[in-house]
Amino acid sequence: MLDVMPQGTSGAPASSLPRLAPPYVIFDREHWATLRAETPLALSEAELLALAGVNDPTSLSDVTEVFLPLVRLIELHMAAARSLRHMVDGAFVGQWRATAPYVIAIAGSVAVGKSTFARLLRAVLGQSQNRPRVELVTTDGFLQPTQVLQANGLMERKGFPESYDLRKMLAFLEGLKSGESQLRIPTYSHEAYDVVPGEFQVVDRPDILIFEGLNVLQTANSLVAVASDFFDFTIYLDADTATIEEWYVDRFLKLQRTVFQREASYFHHYKDLTPEAAAKVARDIWRRINLPNLEENIEPTRRRARVVMRKGSDHRVEEIWLRQT
Ligand SMILES: Nc1ncnc2c1ncn2[C@@H]1O[C@H](COP(=O)(O)OP(=O)(O)O)[C@@H](O)[C@H]1O
Ligand SMILES: CC(C)(COP(=O)(O)O)[C@@H](O)C(=O)NCCC(=O)O
């Protein structure tokens, strides 16, 4: 047990003390919520959720109880990183550099909720005291185009390390951290199930960049750098595997009723499936592709994250693990 007293919020459920489970200190949600301290929320929660493109009661309570303490931690970390850099630049190198974007990476399984979490984090960070310019990039854009995946027999390996253009991804991160402006990165369409030819997202020296994808904490032995060399703060979204499978199936069913109905959709041929048949297809894709990828390549990277957010089956963040080493 740690000697840390909960500050206690009136009317809030009782929280237990953080517990040590090396390399983590583990907070329950109620205690974590008290660590928000004075972190203000300038926008109304409804405005925030609209900004984040989320409309869900779970997310609403997450804003104050989970995201504001997280933003406080990130702001403390950001200030410490900046002052270290200034001190070293001034005292040792003798030259000042422009401040590079602060990079927050978000990892986790397919369908664990990374995009939703990243959008919310962007909205909450963007309304914080200095109104930082926050940009969001997902690693989907660095997937190899379908044509290349097909030519290499990799269509059943989408999301696995070999399905990404890792060199392109690392070149982007290196350029970003070197202060380059107007960086162009490819965009990915879930409707087309492919990278969109000729369409780019332009990243122009934001204050903070949120970099989200299942592969962000992975290493590749054959290359000199790994993506995490360029990260300042790392988060892993976690939940029980059986729960994530249900979220995957639910999302697939939602897509089948909407996006798949469009002719341009890669999965248009599934448009008339009954819900039962569609769920069967989704479970089959999950077990053939996304589950093995989670077990072999994603879950093993959890230990690299500074913060692990553990979600319950209703998407509510229940526990926060803060790595101590
Ligand atoms: N906080 C949340 N509350 C309710 N549903 C959520 C929440 N976060 C994610 N979801 C749902 O779970 C599914 C997977 O989330 P998504 O953000 O698309 O995951 P990922 O980007 O990790 O693949 C989606 O259907 C999404 O709407
Ligand atoms: C493109 C993805 C690797 C990205 O994952 P996500 O954005 O869902 O985290 C994934 O959505 C995917 O296409 N996986 C391959 C199997 C499938 O169609 O689910």
Image (tube, rainbow, N blue to C red):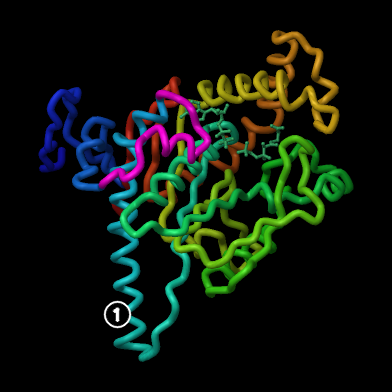
Q: Position of residue 232 (x, y in %)?
A: 42, 60
- Magenta stretch: includes residue 43: yes
Q: Position of residue 278 (x, y in %)?
A: 73, 15
For mark 1, give the secondary structure.
helix
The one nearer the camera, 292 or 180, is: 180
Drawn side of residue 142 relative to residue 65, left or right: right
- Magenta stretch: includes residue 212: no
Relative vertical location of residue 79 with respect to residue 211 in this rendering, above or below: below
The one nearer the camera, 49 or 28, is: 49
Q: Position of residue 42 (x, y in %)?
A: 32, 45
Relative vertical location of residue 85 with respect to residue 187 in this rendering, above or below: below
**Residue plotted at (44% across, 20% down):** 314
Figure quadrant of residue 256: top right
Label 1 packing within 10 angstroms: few (<14), some (14-19), many (20+): some
**Residue plotted at (41% across, 55% down):** 233
Figure quadrant of residue 174: bottom right
Q: Which residue is mark 1?
A: 87
**Residue plotted at (56% across, 62% down):** 226
Q: Considering the image in quadrants, where does the C terminus appear?
A: bottom left
Figure quadrant of residue 102: bottom left
Magenta range = 40-57
Q: Considering the image in quadrants, where does the N terminus appear?
A: top left
Drawn side of residue 241 relative to residue 95, left or right: right
Q: Give the amino acid type for the residue marked by disc 1 in the picture.
A: Met
